[in-house]
Amino acid sequence: MVKIQNACQEWGFFQLLNHGIPHALLDRVKELFKEYYKNSMDAEFQKSEIVGMLESAVSQGKNFSTTKIDADWETGFFLQDETYDTLSPPLPTNLKETMKEFTEEVKRLAERVLDIICENLGLEKGYLKEALAGGNGNGNAPFFGIKMAHYPPCPRPDLVDGLRSHLDAGGVILLLQDDEVGGLQVLKDGTWFDVEPIPHAIVIDIGDQLEVMTNGKCKSMWHRVLSKKDANRMSVAAFYNPSSKAEVYPAPQLIVKAAEQNGNGIGINNINAESGYTYPKFVSKDYMKVYGEQKFLPREPRFEAMRTLNSLK
């Protein structure tokens, strides 16, 4: 418990072993996805815009020694319940059924991780799940989706990243990364650290809105994926995020606790914007709209936009 809380507070990332998801299922996800990429995605990627951008930059002899191409050396797709049958080319039946099985397992794991965070912070079990759903028993569910990505071999890794540095926007992200090919890095204290591949581990990553809900006790951290010259890296990232209608704000109990630690005694019924909120209060869909336009930019302007939106309401 202490190790998990330290990882959430100091790193925003940790690798989880003994998580309960069968290793055979994880192996099947990786094997079938790699096969699907080879058969159905690789040829299209070679005709993609980013490949053309890199070829153009190299042919023109431009010097990108300090400025990389502003795009990602990445290909993939996003899976939600309603998109399984709309992908083109369609998912093979075995991959589709495997991903549905994986989805149920990783959802359960996400909720277990959230309850561990709750216990560490002294919050009631289920608080964060309910907060991500929007609270008040409104019948909404947290948003859940899976980004399936490949980072193909890149002839000039010095000119383009697999995925540019960014903060994740949502709740808790659970990543099944390639067992053999690294590239994921997290930024801490000005230094980029490798998230080394560990077979059958699930990487846990904290998003912006979970940082807000935990009043900064869990940190959303900058991370990126480096491209590789001679390797094809696979990544399966599950996002357990707030529902679009969820109001996002720090847990009141944590505001009271922070105030007590600072010598300011406030009751849980006296909390307002002036009594201890370090973070803005906002509706998740409003934040996601701004995030979609500013994903690779610093976060504070996004929070300022939410404060401005609140002042106009």
Image (cartoon, grey):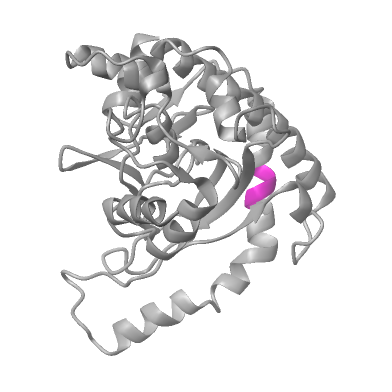
Q: Quadrant of the N terminus?
A: top left
Is 124 inside the magenta-drawn segment? Answer: no
Q: Is residue 153 left or right of residue 140?
A: left
Could you say where residue 248 lies in the image, as x and y percent from the top left? 47, 38
Number of marks: 0
Q: Give the overall secondary structure of the magenta segment.
A: helix
Asked if residue 23 is positioned above or below residue 41 in the image, the reply reads above
Q: Quadrant of residue 268?
A: top left
In this view, the residue farthest toward the bottom is 60
Asked if residue 54 is positioned above or below residue 207 in the image, the reply reads below
Could you say where residue 109 lies in the image, as x and y percent from the top left? 60, 24
Q: Is residue 65 left or right of residue 105?
A: left
Could you say where residue 261 lies in the image, as x and y percent from the top left? 21, 13
51 and 239: which is toward the camera: 239
257 and 10: which is toward the camera: 257
116 and 231: which is toward the camera: 116
Q: Is residue 232 visible?
A: no
Q: Which residues are magenta?
A: 30-34
Could you say where residue 191 lies in the image, as x and y percent from the top left? 17, 41
Asked if residue 63 is positioned above or below residue 289 in the image, the reply reads below
User: Residue at position x 23%, y 86% from top?
Assistant: 61
Q: Quadrant of residue 253?
A: top left
Q: Is residue 138 visible?
A: yes
210 and 149: which is toward the camera: 210
User: Residue at position x 44%, y 34% from top?
Assistant: 210
Q: Is residue 199 left or right of residue 257?
A: right
Q: Is residue 201 left or right of residue 277?
A: right
